Image: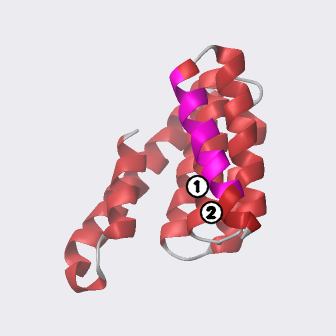
Amino acid sequence: MDGLAYLGVALRTTTTNWKLRRSLLHRASRIIQGLKLLAQYNPNNCLSYAVLLEAEYAAVTKRYDVAGINYDRAISISTKGSLYDLSIHYQVAGNFYLSDMHDVEKGLKYLRAACQVYEEWGCLAAVTHLRERIRELESIDEL
């Protein structure tokens, strides 16, 4: 999760603070490398997160086509893992399509999938939160 935090801060760091942004991207890159190494020995626990972080890294560096491909790869890999991983991956992908790509339809598709997986998992607080967000987005999209 540190990698997601570093990339989240890097995304919001202005270009005037390029040293901090570069440092955060470097830290995230090292985490990705470490996860890829661990994934060689235990792909079930590490590979989908390595690919998810690669997607986020690509999004932060504005390589949106690579990001979209890697979000889908991370989701595909995580379908063989835990519901927790799958729900997080769907939610992060949905946020990418909403925030970076401004594609409400695609973002909603991923958030609905995340909501369904959270419900399957039994994480009712996440389900409630996502349903409220989905309703808000649907009402905005109708305008």
Which residue corresponds to the image point at 26% horizontal and 65% vertical from the top-left? 23
Q: Does residue 48 show up? A: yes
Q: Are marks 1 and 2 in contact (CB under 8 Å)?
A: yes
| Residue 64 image label | none
Q: Nearer the viewer, residue 131 or 49?
A: 131
Q: Does residue 40 show up? A: no
Question: Residue beneath label 2, please?
Answer: 98
Question: Residue beneath label 1, please?
Answer: 95
Name the image quarter holding the C terminus: bottom right
Which portion, as a residue range, is magenta? 125-138
Q: Quadrant location of residue 39?
A: top right
Circle 1 sits in a helix, a strand or a loop, which is it? helix
Q: Identify the amino acid type marked 1.
A: Asn
Which residue corresponds to the image point at 56% horizontal and 44% vertical from the top-left? 50
Which residue corresponds to the image point at 75% horizontal and 38% vertical from the top-left? 113
Q: Identify the amino acid type marked 2.
A: Leu
Q: Nearer the viewer, residue 30 or 91?
A: 91
- Vertical side of 95 occupied by 50: above or below: above
**Is the stretch drawn in magenta largely helix, strand or loop?**
helix
